[in-house]
Amino acid sequence: MNDLTIAELSTKVGKTATVRGWLHKRRDLGGMVFTVLRDRSGLVQAIIKDEAEQAKLAGLQNGTVLKISGSIVEEARAVGGVEIHEPTLEIISPVTDVMPIEIDKPLDHKSENFDVLFENRVVGLRNLHERAIFRVQASLGRGFRDYFEKQDFVEIHTPKLLAGATEGGAEVFETNYFGDKATLAQSPQFYKQMMVGVFERVFEMAPVYRAEPSVTTRHMSEYISLDAEVGFINFDDLLSMVGGLLIHMTEYAWKHNEAELQLLGAVKPVLPKAIPRLKMSEVHELYQKATGEKAVGEKDLFPAEERWICEYAARELGSEAVFVTDWPAAEMKFYHLADDEHPEIAVRADLIFRGVEIVTTSMREHRYDKLVAQLKKIAHGDPESDGFKYFVSAFKFGMPPHGGFGMGLERVTQELIGLSNVKEASLFPRDTKRLAP
Amino acid sequence: MNDLTIAELSTKVGKTATVRGWLHKRRDLGGMVFTVLRDRSGLVQAIIKDEAEQAKLAGLQNGTVLKISGSIVEEARAVGGVEIHEPTLEIISPVTDVMPIEIDKPLDHKSENFDVLFENRVVGLRNLHERAIFRVQASLGRGFRDYFEKQDFVEIHTPKLLAGATEGGAEVFETNYFGDKATLAQSPQFYKQMMVGVFERVFEMAPVYRAEPSVTTRHMSEYISLDAEVGFINFDDLLSMVGGLLIHMTEYAWKHNEAELQLLGAVKPVLPKAIPRLKMSEVHELYQKATGEKAVGEKDLFPAEERWICEYAARELGSEAVFVTDWPAAEMKFYHLADDEHPEIAVRADLIFRGVEIVTTSMREHRYDKLVAQLKKIAHGDPESDGFKYFVSAFKFGMPPHGGFGMGLERVTQELIGLSNVKEASLFPRDTKRLAP
């Protein structure tokens, strides 16, 4: 643990120093061996002239784990500004096979290459570009928690093995649970709402499971859901909170991982302090007027319309994200709140960012009688059943007005970096055809 | 969102203020109604003399969500030092049913009461004592992350849906995965090791699933596993890191949640900067000598021995935690490292805290050839099989010496607070008989 990292070598110019890491690439040229060593902090070149030292690498391939000691020399053209001269090598773990995937240049993320990319993930993630994605992702998660911890939210851990399906439908994984049937949680929805009755403000960051047979660029069967739920809030403040979160996560990533974001060619999004809000009917009108495609009266946004409204918002409203509000109540979940004055409208918004929905947020129905009525009417559920009785009991014994949201960590990583498929933002993606590595 | 919390009322003495929360309890006495309101920050009493205001509460029960405005008066005998006089009430969510569980005094955690405790968890968690447990738990998780983030570890998210069982054995949940068989991860073991090849230092905080039919005070079928793995480390530094973690998490919780820990009667553990280390053979000898029970030569610690050695360490070594090292290699996992000079010994330690093992940590075998040999010999595994080929490929292409550990968040919460059963430290515990709420 006491070695320097490669990034710290610049403090040792003119001295000798030792670093450990992986042989990232090598070139033999005019009797000299140019080796590049990789550690968690970066790359450094060591120039080996001594034949005995060169011989230590005979037959060894990239990936070999090495300890290199030598003189640290300033070299403006090198990454990090230094090189190692007259190195002494110690082989820690020899590698004799050639890697199945190249890791010294950006990997090709064309969709036809995904099988190779994901099959060789274990080694492929050692590529600086690949690993940069997940350093950014770690910062986004940290930024998410930081935002809510500062606002007195409590982190909760809710079960993923459930007796019934949260959102209903057939798209749920099942398992034998000591003779009973259990399902894997599709979301922490019921639990986070129940916990508003305990902590008022809660968040969770945990896997969720979707047995959707969809093959799209947006879906995976397992992903990390960032969830929060807050009591004693109104819709206006809820949207400000969600918009503030996207801004905070963005700032957090750019503050802590600007080098990685630059390496990936990510462009920092333009986000005003108040993310603009448009009603769905307004979006439909604007879209129909601009494109001639019929949209007015539709109950959802088309994918093309999501892309278009983000271009519009970027151009006309100075924001790469936009809230679309006033969704039809006819399409809402039973736990959503319908507007008391306009019961045909659900108090819900989607946050569309760079052409894709990244958050669905809504106020929830907190009144016991109305919730039970909606449960029966919309979900055809029985409030006395095992699947719903615990959830409705929270309301029977007093719940305040509240709202919340869910956001996929991989999807927000994808959109902030500008990746074409959400799977590129998962260390080990899971879809209908892939369960390994 | 703009109301004060109850804890902030002490800044408003002599003024009027508004708070919102839940009716926690009430007493009618001599024409006055004494109500206690609860919010996320604490309790405050409001004294209602006005009959019209009293009438608003007619027929309403604890749990009712209220908005109370009134004069804030200093009252040294009250929790928080203030009371609300001449209050005006607004009913936000009326509750007319009597709660199924009392929440205004500590709940009885005798094991025969667990069914009632867990069946009524949704409302029971509103009890100040219950919710205090989970505020402490949130701090422990935050302390865990804080410790590793400061040491340049990267947070990873590894899949919980796997093609094969990580640790082997029958104690694994299975699910139909689009026609294939998937298992739920028992630990992130293989993934965190593989990620040492990418980031060197990684941690994860995520659910794991154990289909063990065990009914004990230590086991659940779903829990939150705190995992870390670090490259280029030796065993001595690994133990220092794990010991430092326990100390950091403890300090973190006491710094941020001292009020909750006091409410729960938790006693801050005595932990020296360097947690003492004893070899298993030493523990056996000490135990046998002190108790007369045969222990010398045994390959594991008895539960009674774990309790005894902690009492011994507290008394003789000034530490409520102790590392037990030098485990027999005959019992080790295939990915553990056996001591090169003493191949009968595994380079492993258990951290025993307050009588219970809370961490197992070990150095891993990082040499490809030796790992493959151990895989075949110990786990009877095929390195070419789908279950192992990805894992061993990380080693084939270069892994440094590394080690790591896993720790159950609920178990460390239990032991720090002094709860008798790990389920008391889970919001919604899962065991062989309980899958709800």
Image (cartoon, coloured by chain):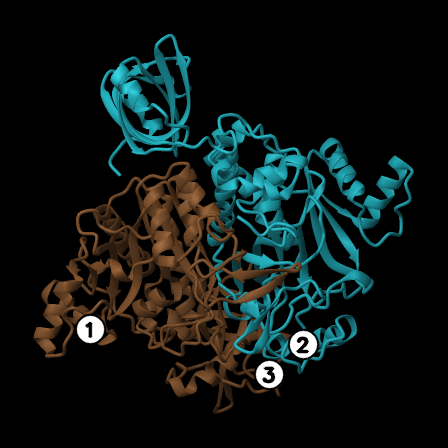
Chain colours: A cyan, B brown
Amino acid type, label 2: Tyr
Q: Pointer 1: residues within 10 angstroms few (<14), some, or many (20+)?
A: many
Mark 2 falls within which chain?
A
User: Does the CB distance between marks 1 and 2 fall below 8 Å?
Assistant: no
Choose mark 2 or mark 3, whichever is in front: 2
Indicate the quadrant where residue A191 lies. Answer: bottom right
Q: Earlier in the sequence, mark 1 or mark 3?
A: 3
Is disc 3 placed on a helix, strand or loop? loop
Q: How many marks?
A: 3
Question: Is residue B337 at least partly visible in the picture?
Answer: yes
Choose mark 1 or mark 2, whichever is in front: 1
Distance Cα–Cα, label 1 vs label 3: 57 Å
Reading the image, the residue beneath label 3 is B57
Residue closest to the eye, A62 or A261: A62
Indicate the quadrant where residue A322 lies. Answer: top right
Distance Cα–Cα, label 2 vs label 3: 18 Å
Q: Are marks 1 and 3 on the same chain?
A: yes
Amino acid type, label 1: Glu
Residue extending farthest to the top is: A30
Reading the image, the residue beneath label 1 is B305
**Residue A12 placed where, x, y %?**
26, 21
Identify the mark at residue B228; answer none if there is no mark. Answer: none
Question: Could you tell whether B135 is left or right of B304 in the image?
Answer: right
Reading the image, the residue beneath label 2 is A368
Amino acid type, label 3: Leu
Q: Is residue B65 above or below residue A121?
A: below
Mark 3 falls within which chain?
B
Indicate the quadrant where residue A268 lies. Answer: top right
Is disc 1 placed on a helix, strand or loop? helix
